[in-house]
Image: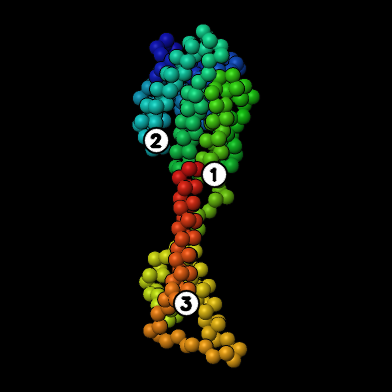
Amino acid sequence: MENKIFVNSFIDFGMQEFFYGNNGFSFEKHVIECLVHIYGKKALKSIYDARNEDAFSDTILKYGIKPNVYDNFLRDTSKYEKFKEEKEKNLAAKTDVTCTIEIELATLYIQRCLSFTPTNDDIAGFENELLNDFDVIKFHFNTSLEPNKTREFWEKKKKLLSDDIELVDIKPDYLDEFTYARFGVKLEDVRKMDYRMVDELNKYIRAKLKEDNDDSGNEKKKLGANTIITSGNGFIDALLIISIIVTEISIGMIYYFLHV
């Protein structure tokens, strides 16, 4: 093979160590092992042997990864090589670039999973390679500013890959148009409500109808078709409370999904 550096010093050294080196640990080799899990051993070895840098970049980008993610990955691997030089002069030196690189690897893996649904074994295999090797754990303890940063990121993101999560389109059980009209509400407006708000509204209406039909002997005020319930009897207040509650729930759910 030629002595020309492939992509950059980090990638070149990692490829050489993974495909042709011994069983020793290096962070570069660890990163290539994760890339092999994502893109395939045969494909990456063939690319490395041919020193085909265009094919390497095309492979990394083929699942829809944005070019800037790939550029950042190369930038950060180059940063690590500079850190290694610093580490040789100061054994106590630590960095956050190691976790940054691993987080980028996790991002590449998740992006691939958007194209091909992973099995539980595949997810577990990648997780073990990324996080659970003893040499990797020891390396982070001695080198990283936040040894658990990658693990914390992965624990949040891997929820997106779980086949236990099923998105269900919940269709509210609407009452008939006339029933809503008796309470001064239009069916078309109800259809615009969150399903939880519809559920609470229906509970309220059913409870009031039950009271209206109660045979206790007490005289009730009958509701006509044009009766509008105002905040004087608590209906509008109830809707307001429901709206506030549902808004808070929705905000909480939006915040959750934006941060996992």
Q: Is residue 65 above or below residue 13?
A: below
Near-viewer residue (226 or 259):
226
Instruction: Estimate the x, y position of residue 155 in percent, counting from the top left.
Output: 56, 38
Amino acid carrying label 3: it is Asn
Using a 10 Å C-alpha cutoff, classify the residue at mark 1 as few (fewer than 14 neighbours), some (14 to 19) or many (20 or more).
few
Which of the 4 image quarters holds residue 154? top right
Write down the residue under mark 3.
233
Residue 39 visible in image = no
Q: Residue furthest front?
A: 232
Q: Of the numbered discs in the image, which one, if any, rests on residue 65? A: 2
Q: Earlier in the sequence, mark 3 or mark 1?
A: 1
Q: Of the numbered discs in the image, which one, if any, rests on residue 133? A: none
Using a 10 Å C-alpha cutoff, classify the residue at mark 3 as few (fewer than 14 neighbours), some (14 to 19) or many (20 or more).
few
Write down the residue under mark 1.
159
Instruction: Estimate the x, y position of residue 64 in percent, counting from the top left.
Output: 38, 38
State how far apart marks 1 and 2 are (Cα).
20 Å
**Looking at the figure, which quarter contains the N terminus?**
top left
Are the residues at dot 3 and dot 2 in contact (C-beta closer than 8 Å)?
A: no
Using a 10 Å C-alpha cutoff, classify the residue at mark 2 as few (fewer than 14 neighbours), some (14 to 19) or many (20 or more).
some
